[in-house]
Image: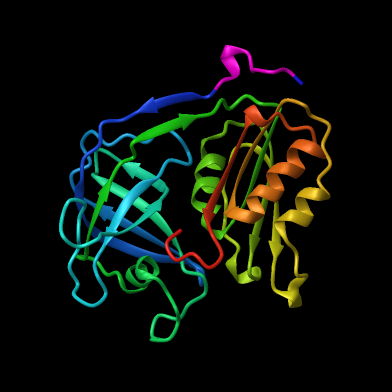
Amino acid sequence: MPDTLPPMRQPQRLRHDTRRRNLKVVSTRDLSPFMRRITLVGDMSGFQSSGFDDHVKLFFPDPATGLIALPGGDVKPIARDYTPRAFDLVAGTLTLDFALHGVAKDDPENGAGPATTWALHAVPGDTLVLGGPRGSTVWPKDYALHLLIGDETALPAIGRRLEELPAGVRVIVLVAVDNPTATLDLPTQADATIHWLFRDPAHGGHTLTDAVARLSFRQTDVFAWVAAEAEEVRVIRDLLITRHGVNPEQMKAAGYWQKGGAGA
């Protein structure tokens, strides 16, 4: 395995000028009981998002006061990172997908955090403040094989990557969700094989780790992208390197959340 990739295979890293934007909800749509798509509108001039897994920082209102705290004030902001699922600079729109984790909108004991609570109750006219992206990592699209691996929180990035990849590119997708009602339509021109894994014991009790361990592929020119719970991502990364021989320089593995860590 080479120590470094040839320059043409290195990802391109970009920095962006950032500013805060005040956007308003223009529409909401439930993609599944576990995922809600929210489109916002406002001044999107200068907005840049070149990488499929970029993230913006969203600032949410305090559930008790309804006020949005911002950095630099006396009150700690309630902020979370989300992937720009789609954006239109001409129309001034930004689309975000929120994983709802199966909570019920009208159940006060559902345990939802501030981001999920906001998404559950968002209606046209509601406001949201966002910042970023600060930068982008743009991975080449011409690898012999793309591996996209994640759970619900990874679906916005996976969906965006599949839409961006050209026809003929080989892709294997592994997505773990609770049950079949959580699956989404993932359109793509690429030659993609999509495997949905259901954690619910009634539907197989499958895990991402087990699925990655069972993977079989012959390609050596592989780009692997992994996003899920932090400890699970660490194990999957090790499997991809030690069992499947994936070059760690052609891999992005990110813990999108952490068990027991609210807002992690």
Is residue 109 rendered to the left or right of residue 253? Answer: left
Q: Residue at x 45, y 35 (%)?
A: 51
In the rendered image, the quadrant that contains the N terminus is top right
Q: Decide whether residue 3 is among the magenta residues.
A: yes
The number of callouts visible is: 0
Based on the displayed image, in which of its 4 quarters is residue 244 positioned? top right
Q: Main secondary structure of the magenta part?
A: loop
Task: Please state the horizontal and vertical placement of residue 182, each as a whole percent of the image.
Answer: 58, 67
Residue in front for this viewpoint, 261 or 118: 261
Is residue 32 rendered to the left or right of residue 108? Answer: right
Above or below: residue 197 compared with residue 52: below
Task: Please state the horizontal and vertical placement of residue 43, each as a whole percent of the image.
Answer: 18, 44
Q: Decide whether residue 207 is among the magenta residues.
A: no
Q: Which residues are magenta?
A: 2-10
Residue in front for this viewpoint, 147 or 194: 147
Based on the displayed image, in which of its 4 quarters is residue 168 positioned? top right
Q: Residue at x 23, y 78 (%)?
A: 64
Q: Residue at x 73, y 42 (%)?
A: 238
